[in-house]
Image (cartoon, rainbow, N blue to C red):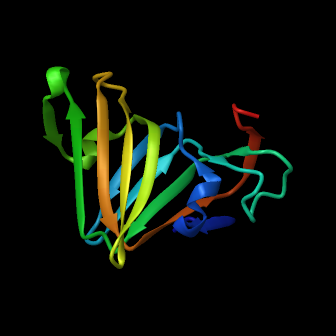
Amino acid sequence: MKTWKYRTTNTFFDYLDFHDCLVEKIIVEKDKVIIEFRFIYVSAEHPLNPNDVAKSTDKCRLTFYGVTDSAAVIHLDEGMEKQVLITDLEEMEFLKFTQKPLGNLMIFDMFGTEWKTHQFSSIQITAISFTLEWNDFTENAWYV
């Protein structure tokens, strides 16, 4: 099992930026969904970022815990949608990622483009929480 140097949770969601981040792999387990990214962005305000600017991470892993529901769709022309497996959206590029409370759970909505079809796609996961893990800060975020 890989050891990660940095670990944060969705408590610090507002300090994480997934815009233009590329999914490399999606794994679905009993009550977990794991999404591996090439990188994500961590704001300068995040308690784990020792830099005075937002930085990219190296390869990282986003793990949703206590998953009670998950769904994925590819948005087709004229408002049509095609239900797909979450794992079908590997190589998705995130454009927007939000979280909102639902009782004791959170609803995580991810929207982006799917690289194979170039169609807009989305993932919705209902879970207790997530953790994000990575090992290093790399270059400045694109928006710095």
Q: Tell me which residue sits at (35%, 73%) in the image.
A: 105
Residue nearer the viewer, 134 or 102: 102
Residue 48: image x %, image y %? Answer: 74, 63
Which residue is outermost to the bottom? Answer: 104
Q: Is residue 3 visible?
A: no
Vertical placement of 84 versus 78: above or below? below
Q: Tell me which residue sits at (30%, 53%) in the image.
A: 124
Residue nearer the viewer, 32 or 41: 41
Residue 115: image x %, image y %? Answer: 36, 26
- Number of numbered markers: 0
Vertical placement of 49 versus 39: above or below? below
Vertical placement of 50 versus 67: above or below? above
Considering the image in quadrants, where does the C terminus appear?
top right
Q: Tell me which residue sits at (84%, 52%) in the image.
A: 51
Would residue 29 appear left or right of 22 to someone viewing this image?
left
Vertical placement of 31 versus 37: above or below? below
Quadrant of res 9: bottom right
Which residue is outermost to the right? Answer: 52
Q: Is residue 92 visible?
A: yes
Residue 99: image x %, image y %? Answer: 43, 58
Quadrant of res 143: top right
Would residue 10 appear left or right of 71 to someone viewing this image?
right
Residue 14: image x %, image y %? Answer: 60, 56
